[in-house]
């Protein structure tokens, strides 16, 4: 078909004719009664229309705004033509889990925030990426070409997003990959941390099964440093990837933190969301006033999970304002719709309890924002005489995480770490130990799933270079 400049120009300005559409979402009154995903897929016609809104920039900022460098305009053009399988294939070429990232990524801070159109009118990249990959997987088109076995073996420690991404790429290149996971199912925080209303567990299990079909072996219920040593792995495998995450919860540092019913957020989320029993003490929030401390995505997850478990009231107390809150704006909006309340510029200074040692209230102080700190965020400071009391029957701490220190008696302690316990790596994601690589939260600190996926893929490339060197 000859090139038609007029048709091309018309296509480039579709965004003038079509408004941005948001993916179908269940009403809050319905969705708070279960843990199923709240968003569903667009239909094919809407996907084609929405994809046609992409202006096909010569220097697409959405690509640089995506940590994986996904070729978004290219698969947008294919989707606009109804070539969904081809679009999904292109999407898979740069992402190890292209059906998972659109469910959990804060697109409003990444690719969609980088769109040349205003934030309110940006192309709905995440919803389109989710559709094309679900379309392909439903038609058995989610497989990738696999190279013949090359005779080389790699051990991956941790079956979270980074470990799965590393295993995915290496298995495609012919490496025999064994993933060691301390839990009884692969998935890491995708399975045990992120609630099912954002990411159905069947989606994670399907991705693990795809890796099994690619030849990846999973050994679950195995803790490296306890059941098997790093030295053994280095002896048995050509290279090792450490994708063990950062699960040391940051504590609440104020009087009363030791009271009963003051809990860390992650065990609460794991207990309520894990597809298998984890042996954690039961936490009943039904009819209780729940206060969540923190402003990240884990805090949003705690609020929305508590609501689904029957909490009478759910309040988030965060020391900065909304503009400086690290959590996803989409998840914040969803939490508001579902009944959560937010107290910004509010910082706990003490917890109050009763004679039984149970928490009854959070003593708070109002904050104001001062000069920017080292990270560029304005530093909060207390407002004198602004103390007040927030009633609470249960407090969930969601202040983030640090890497878990390696025991001095473990050979993992040979891996060099920085001042706050994160593993040091070079430009290839390799640690100070030759052939031992690392990535994800254990290197960068708590971050996005897409960052862990990027680290895992980058480490796979580094492992391939290392094992291919003469």
Image (tube, rainbow, N blue to C red):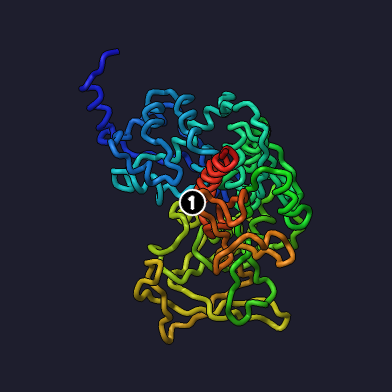
Q: Mark 1 points at which residue?
A: 427
The residue most toward the bottom is 385
Can you give x and y, in whole percent of width and height, for residue 2 in the image?
A: 26, 14
**What kind of element bears circle 1?**
loop
Residue 65 seen in the figure: yes
Which residue is at a point 36% across and 76% down the rendered structure image? 370
- Please name the residue shown 36% across and 42% down the image: 62
Q: Nearer the viewer, residue 369 or 182?
A: 182
> Which residue is depicted at the point 58% across and 80% down?
254
Residue sitting farthest toward the front: 470
Q: Badge 1 local density, few (<14 within 10 Å), some, or many (20+)?
A: few
Say which quadrant the N terminus sits in. Answer: top left
Q: Is residue 16 above or below residue 452?
A: above
Where's residue 58, x and y in %? Answer: 28, 36
Q: In the figure, residue 128 lies in which quadrant?
A: top left
Picture coordinates of residue 296, whole percent (x, y): 50, 61
Q: Nearer the viewer, residue 456 or 426?
A: 426
Q: In this view, does 116 lie above or below 419?
A: above
Is 406 placed above or below 153 here? below
Q: Quadrant of the C terminus?
A: top right
Expressed as whole percent of the image width and height from the top left, the position of residue 67 reads 44, 46
Q: Is residue 135 left or right of residue 125?
A: right
Question: Does residue 392 lie above or below 461 as drawn?
Answer: below
- Which residue occupies the foreground of this view, 349 or 290? 349
**In the image, what residue occupies the spot 37% across and 74% down?**
369
Residue 187 visible in rendering = no
């Amino acid at each position: 078909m000859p090139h038609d400049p007029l048709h091309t120009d018309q296509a480039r300005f579709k965004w003038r004719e079509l408004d941005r559409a948001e993916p179908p979402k269940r009403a809050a009154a319905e969705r708070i009664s279960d843990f199923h995903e709240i968003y569903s897929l667009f239909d094919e016609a809407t996907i084609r229309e929405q994809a046609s809104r992409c202006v096909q920039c010569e220097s697409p900022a959405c690509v640089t705004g995506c940590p994986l460098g996904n070729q978004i305009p290219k698969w947008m053009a294919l989707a606009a033509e109804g070539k969904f399988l081809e679009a999904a294939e292109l999407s898979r070429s740069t992402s190890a889990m292209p059906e998972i990232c659109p469910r959990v990524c804060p697109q409003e801070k990444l690719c969609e925030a980088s769109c040349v159109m205003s934030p309110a009118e940006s192309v709905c990249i995440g919803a389109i990426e989710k559709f094309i990959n679900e379309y392909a997987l439903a038609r058995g088109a989610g497989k990738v070409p696999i190279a013949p076995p090359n005779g080389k073996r790699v051990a991956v420690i941790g079956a979270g997003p980074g470990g799965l991404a590393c295993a995915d790429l290496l298995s495609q290149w012919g490496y025999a990959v064994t993933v060691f996971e301390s839990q009884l199912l692969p998935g890491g925080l995708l399975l045990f941390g992120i609630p099912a209303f954002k990411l159905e567990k069947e989606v994670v299990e399907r991705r693990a099964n795809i890796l099994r079909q690619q030849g990846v072996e999973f050994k679950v219920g195995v803790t490296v440093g306890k059941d098997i040593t790093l030295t053994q792995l280095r002896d048995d495998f050509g290279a090792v990837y450490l994708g063990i995450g950062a699960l040391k919860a940051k504590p609440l540092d104020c009087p009363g933190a030791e009271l009963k019913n003051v809990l860390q957020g992650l065990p609460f989320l794991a207990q309520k969301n894990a597809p298998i029993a984890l042996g954690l003490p039961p936490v009943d929030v039904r009819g209780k006033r729940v206060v969540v401390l923190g402003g990240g995505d884990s805090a949003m997850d705690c609020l929305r999970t508590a609501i689904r478990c029957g909490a009478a009231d759910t309040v988030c107390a965060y020391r900065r304002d909304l503009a400086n809150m690290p959590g996803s704006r989409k998840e914040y909006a969803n939490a508001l719709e579902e009944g959560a309340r937010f107290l910004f510029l509010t910082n706990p200074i003490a917890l109050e309890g009763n004679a039984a040692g149970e928490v009854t209230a959070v003593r708070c102080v109002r904050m104001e924002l001062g000069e920017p700190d080292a990270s560029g965020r304005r530093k909060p400071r207390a407002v004198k005489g602004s103390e007040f009391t927030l009633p609470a029957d249960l407090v969930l701490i969601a202040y983030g995480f640090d890497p878990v220190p390696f025991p001095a008696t473990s050979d993992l302690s040979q891996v060099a770490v920085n001042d706050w316990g994160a593993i040091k790596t070079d430009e290839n994601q390799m640690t100070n130990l030759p052939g031992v690589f690392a990535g994800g939260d254990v290197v960068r600190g708590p971050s996005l799933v897409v960052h862990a996926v990027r680290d895992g893929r980058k480490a796979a490339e580094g492992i391939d270079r290392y094992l291919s060197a003469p």
